Image (cartoon, rainbow, N blue to C red):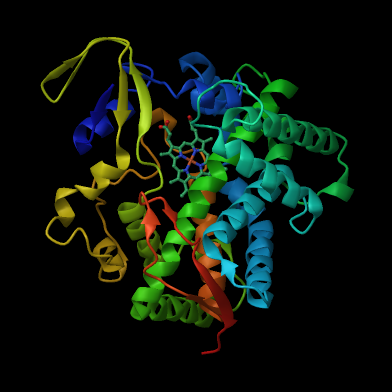
Amino acid sequence: MVVVTDENEVRRLLQAEHKLVESAWPESMRNLLGPNAILTAPAKAHKKQRQILSQAFTEAAMRLYLPTILDVSRYTMEQWAASKEPVLFYSAARAFAFDIAATVLTGTRFDGDTLVKMREEFDVYADGLFSLPLNIPGTPYGKAVKARAYIVAEIERLILDAKASNEAQSTGRKNALRLLLDAQDENGEKLTMEQLKDQILTQLFAGHETTGATLSRVLPEIQRQPHIMARMRQEQAELIQKYGDEITYEMLEQMPYTDAVLKEVMRMHGIVDGVWRQALEDLEIQGCRVPKGWTVQLMVKKAGLAMPEFQGDADRFDPSRWLEDGAPLKKEPKGFMPFGEGPRKCLGMLLAKMEMRALLAVLARGYTVELDDPNEFWFQDFKPVNKLPGRVVKYQA
Ligand code: HEM
């Protein structure tokens, strides 16, 4: 296997998907995602699936999801504030992201038991994704296969409900599943039941680990540097003064400072280290020959950390590096690819941005998160050893 960290090469190869390289995730992941998953689909199937699935991730779709996202954000913050026990924010942020993914993608109620059970099964499922693919009971992979069967059965039930327009089990609002039931490719073909099940499963996976982990990384940073939270509160106060209290889609698009905080978190603590590809022909990468068929790992996080634009103080958490006179940089450094690049660039990017902005807007307007230890050690830069215990208190300006 060849590991590529140079920003130009990483970008070039991501853009050359289906021509020079092809997605090549490990066998455990391919099996557990299912034969129809977009993340692992080969070129022709991928193009077709992307055409259909992207119809649930347009800006217009985001506007339909916003009320649900705001409900879940406010409900979550209230739950955290009301908790008598310390909140473990690493797990709590992932649970929030899962609740968003499940409600927005499938219309599941965000305060019901189905969601809690699905979340638990999903943790077991996710633990097996990168494990030895031997289906033996008791092993991470064996447990994941069992959890997958439960989740897929639940997804099938939700699909049947959506088909029958059974509002009782859903929020009654538009969700991705309802859009996908009607979506067609250029030949008028729709997704089959089997395809829909694998796609919803993939999106639940791709959509919550990433966003949850990113949000949990924001909390220590804003506690360590109180001026960052103060600036986020000021941004909300200015928006309220200009547009009123209600959080609208337009408002979420006008939060350059909060966005800069998120970009800085993704630059320093990017949750996707690298993506896996296979060479479709002999390649030359930085002067080295890589034979056809070899696996190539494209390290998006390392490429971002090494961006020449920020060298000198790359280790400092500083959102202001993403701003020019208070507005977003006119030209973003091209090494910054937290959502990937090219034909497989993250399908849920707009959704991820919207839910992260929504939660931070609700937080900055009325709450303070107090972690017991904002300097808690992150094991392999991936998981905080104590899962970030702390509490939420209400805040008034
Ligand atoms: C901070 C949050 C997120 C990050 C950092 C992130 C990152 C990424 C990256 C790097 C890829 C490219 C994978 C590759 O090239 O092989 C990707 C693909 C993908 N992401 Fe995300 N993602 C996030 C949130 C989401 C959300 C919320 C969803 C949907 C609910 C989602 C759905 C997908 C899907 C379906 C793909 C596969 C696209 C394809 O193969 O065409 N992601 N994501």
In which quadrant will I find the N terminus? Answer: top left
Q: Tell me if I can see residue 335 in this picture.
A: no
- Residue 330, picture quadrant: bottom left
Q: Is residue 286 left or right of residue 210?
A: left
| Residue 284 at x, y percent in the picture | 17, 18
Q: Is residue 271 above or below residue 82?
A: above
Q: Residue at x 19, y 58 (%)?
A: 314
- Residue 26, picture quadrant: top left
Q: Is residue 379 left or right of residue 135?
A: left
Q: Residue at x 50, y 60 (%)?
A: 387
Most extreme residue toward the front is: 138
Q: Is residue 323 above or below residue 291?
A: below
| Residue 391 at x, y percent in the picture | 56, 75
Most extreme residue toward the bottom is: 397
Q: Is residue 15 left or right of residue 67?
A: left
| Residue 246 at x, y percent in the picture | 62, 73
User: How many numbered tags mark residues here?
Assistant: 0
Front residue of 189/307: it is 307
- Residue 160, picture quadrant: top right
Q: Is residue 230 above or below residue 103?
A: below
Q: Tell me if I can see residue 322 in this picture.
A: yes
Q: Residue at x 36, y 23 (%)?
A: 277
